[in-house]
Amino acid sequence: MARCSRSAIVVDDDPLLQRLVCSLMERRGFDVRGAISVAQAREKLSEGDADVIVLDLALGDEDGVDVLEHLASLGSSAAILPVSGFDRRVLRSAVHLGRALGLNVLEPLRKPFTSAQLTEALDAIPVNLLPVAESELAQALTDDRLLLRYQPKIHLQTGRIVGAEALARWTDARRGPVSPDHFIAIAEEGELIHRLTRRVLDVALADCAAWRSAGHDVGVAVNISARSLSDPDLPAQLEDAVHQVGLPPNALTLEVTETVAMRDVDTTMKLLTRLRLRGFALSLDDFGTGYSSLVELHRMPFSELKIDQSFVTRLDKDPDAAIITSAMIALGHALGLEIIAEGVEDESVAQALREMGCDHAQGYLYDHALDATAFRQRLAAD
Ligand code: C2E
Ligand code: MG
Ligand code: MG
């Protein structure tokens, strides 16, 4: 799961300076952690990587090179802003060293610096690393700038399209494309997720109704987030929404990730049962990444299992992945579920899945997520 807000770690053994840098970063929306030694920096990093790390290269008797090496061993993708009172040559060699270790080291800042110089250095951090505010996403929804793409779901034996998964896309004017994992997490922090889910459903259902009026017998799948699953009004709202566009409820599949479904089994079970009773299809997304027990899987009213791409993409190269996938397909079928594999990128994987008896597939081998027009054309040519 993506982190919700952008995080920063400020490593500096000067408490005053550390407080100044921390407060400036907090004002920019970062969730900031401070460290005054190499040991503390390691401790903070053990809690998770950061988006930005401000790193003092001289930490009392220790030096920041240890921190750089530690960051490299962790495979950190943070933007690192080195600061130091040493002369420019020392700073430059630290930058070279960090970059040679594969780290994303920014142009350094020399101490002493003014708050204006620090602001300027922070401004130079690529804009796509800046925190996304909930209000920006809310505005994008209001302005109708959140778009849907459709990734076809393919019948493995016939190669024909059986439906599509709706995937949300948001391109911010300053940042460029923002990953759905990131903006969905921001929306989930507050009430915005309900507006977002509602919008995605309205657009996806209207598009699906248009495909069916054009004679294509296909359904649409929408991802439902954890917060929406705890909304007791959801079944009635969905019933209303399909009714308004004249679709039968089984044209809509609700995808729920395994970790979300198993978080609060009793509440989820109640809602999922009410959704199934109304005729909606339910897919257990990213199956294999959570810890659902066989008993829970048996009790939950899913109609489809979606095998996570981490097993599927390496199916043809990794015998363990093949054994696990084959077992998941047999298990799902024994429980009366349809099986779809996501992340099918190669024909050899598709062939292996066909031999294992998997029903449906989705992945770059067939199509990326297409805009509504391209998807319609794809359907017409099918
Ligand atoms: P997901 O539901 O598991 O969606 C599948 C992800 O795998 C999509 O990424 C898709 O573009 C990507 N993918 C598809 N085929 C392949 C392939 O062959 N190879 C590889 N490597 N990847 C493939 P995307 O669009 O970035 O979405 C990421 C996640 O964001 C989704 O995972 C879903 O959990 C969430 N999401 C997207 N749209 C929505 C939405 O409208 N509402 C909610 N609640 N979540 C959404
Ligand atoms: Mg999904
Ligand atoms: Mg998935």
Image: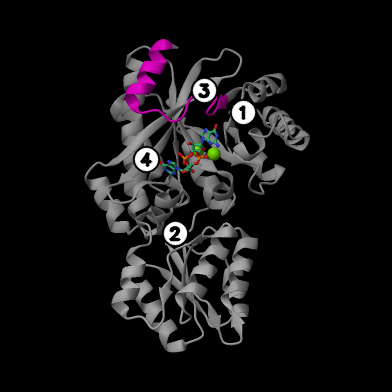
- On whether ligand 1 comes within 8 Å of the CB at mark 4, the answer is yes
Magenta region, residue range: 361-381
User: What amino acid is at disc 3?
Assistant: Tyr
User: Label 2 sits on what residue type?
Assistant: Cys
Measuring from the top left, give residue 176's x and y in whole percent.
34, 46
Secondary structure under badge 3? loop
Mark 2 C-beta to ligand 1 under 8 Å: no
Q: Nearer the viewer, mark 2 or mark 1?
A: 2
Q: Is residue 96 visible?
A: yes
Q: Is mark 1 within 8 Å of ligand 3?
A: no
- Disc 3 from disc 1: Cα separation: 17 Å
Asked whether residue 116 is drawn in magenta, I would say no
Residue indicated by mark 2: 4
In the rendered structure, the answer to whether residue 357 lies left or right of residue 128 reads: right
Among the two numbered marks 3 and 1 on one chain, the one whose residue lies closer to the N terminus: 1
Q: Which residue is mark 1?
A: 339
Residue under pointer 3:
366
Mark 2 and mark 4: span between their CA atoms? 17 Å
Q: Nearer the viewer, residue 342 or 212?
A: 342
Disc 4: which residue: 169
- The numbered mark, 4 or 3, whose residue comes first in the sequence reads 4
Please, which colouring scheme is shown?
Answer: one colour
Give the alpha-carbon distance from disc 4 to disc 1, as whole Å.
26 Å
Residue neighbourhood size for the residue with mark 1, other residues' Cα within 10 Å, grouped as few (<14), some (14–19), many (≥20): many
Which numbered circle lies on residue 354?
none
Q: Earlier in the sequence, mark 2 or mark 4?
A: 2
